[in-house]
Image: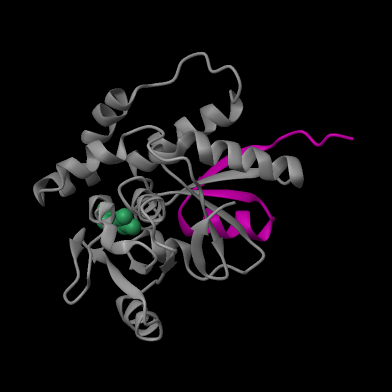
């Protein structure tokens, strides 16, 4: 008997917890910029991205791994002593090939926390939108659990850019084969550029990040959380 596909959405840590408790297939979205950064790092050869909730936890984890690079931000600014900030453009470098990235961010890694190993958490953004949609639908076919798209939001409040990306992901989840019309990367950039977080990023000189994060299907991969690290889903 086929089980009808249920798709829902939510915002922030409480929605994520509820989806975890109910065994949902989860797509976690922080389009500006943590999701986009994790996808870009794995696509450019990082072996894993380990999320850390706090700066001290990130330093502690990195100290135990000889191959690790430290990355992250607070208030969108790079952290002292870290190798990289949270700009996805940092991860276009060949220097990250084969390296583990330990990432701490203001919101995404705190919303994520430390979920149980049994959870199914994928990372979605415009950069991998078709791949993450097909991965989630493929996982549903293997084991028919509901799919929940969780917008990371901004410390449990909605963030417009994550709502926009979640809407686009849900649209594609519900029109996987014959989409009536999809927005272009330029349309997405126009929508993202006027969000509150985009204004912060622009004021800090990161406007290029917003254009980069608006690009649809740059990468054909989906990060999945396995034993506390995001790796490429195979
Ligand atoms: C976050 O996780 O809070 C964001 O990715 C912040 C940022 O733009 O660096």
Q: Residue furthest right?
A: 1
Q: Position of residue 50 (x, y in %)?
A: 43, 68
State the image quarter where residue 163 is shown. top left
Q: Is residue 144 visible?
A: no
Q: Position of residue 177 (x, y in %)?
A: 61, 21
State the image quarter where residue 71 is shown. bottom left
Please report the residue visible at 65 percent of the width from the left and 38 percent of the height from the top: 137
Nearest to the observer: residue 219 or residue 225: 219
Nearest to the observer: residue 92 or residue 2: 92
Please tell me whether residue 45 is drawn above or below residue 145 in the rendered image: below
Nearest to the observer: residue 221 or residue 78: 221
Q: Position of residue 88 (x, y in %)?
A: 28, 51
Marks counted in the figure total: 0
Q: Position of residue 5 (x, y in %)?
A: 71, 35
Q: In the image, is 86 to the left or to the right of 159?
A: left
Residue bounds of the magenta highlight: 1-27
Q: Is residue 26 magenta?
A: yes
Please report the residue visible at 53 percent of the width from the left and 28 percent of the height from the top: 172
């Amino acid at each position: 008997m086929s089980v009808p596909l249920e798709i829902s959405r939510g915002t922030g840590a409480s929605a994520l917890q509820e989806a975890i408790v109910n065994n949902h297939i989860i797509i976690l979205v922080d389009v500006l910029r943590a999701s986009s950064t994790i996808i870009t790092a794995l696509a450019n050869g990082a072996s894993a991205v380990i999320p850390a909730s706090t700066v001290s936890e990130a330093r502690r984890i990195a100290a135990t791994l000889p191959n690790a690079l430290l990355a992250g931000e607070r208030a969108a600014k790079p952290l002292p002593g870290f190798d990289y900030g949270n700009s996805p453009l940092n991860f276009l470098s060949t220097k990250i090939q084969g390296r583990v990235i330990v990432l701490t961010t203001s919101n995404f890694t705190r919303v994520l926390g430390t979920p149980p190993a049994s959870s199914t958490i994928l990372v979605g953004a415009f950069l991998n939108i078709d791949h993450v949609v097909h991965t989630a639908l493929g996982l549903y076919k293997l084991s028919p659990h509901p799919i929940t798209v969780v917008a990371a939001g901004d410390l449990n409040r909605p963030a417009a850019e994550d709502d926009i990306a979640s809407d686009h992901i849900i649209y594609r989840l519900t029109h996987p084969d014959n989409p009536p019309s999809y927005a272009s990367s330029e349309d997405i950039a126009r929508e993202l550029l006027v969000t509150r977080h985009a204004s912060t990023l622009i004021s800090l000189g990161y406007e290029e990040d917003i254009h980069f994060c608006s690009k649809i299907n740059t990468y054909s991969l989906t990060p999945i959380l396995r034993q506390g690290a995001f790796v490429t889903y195979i």
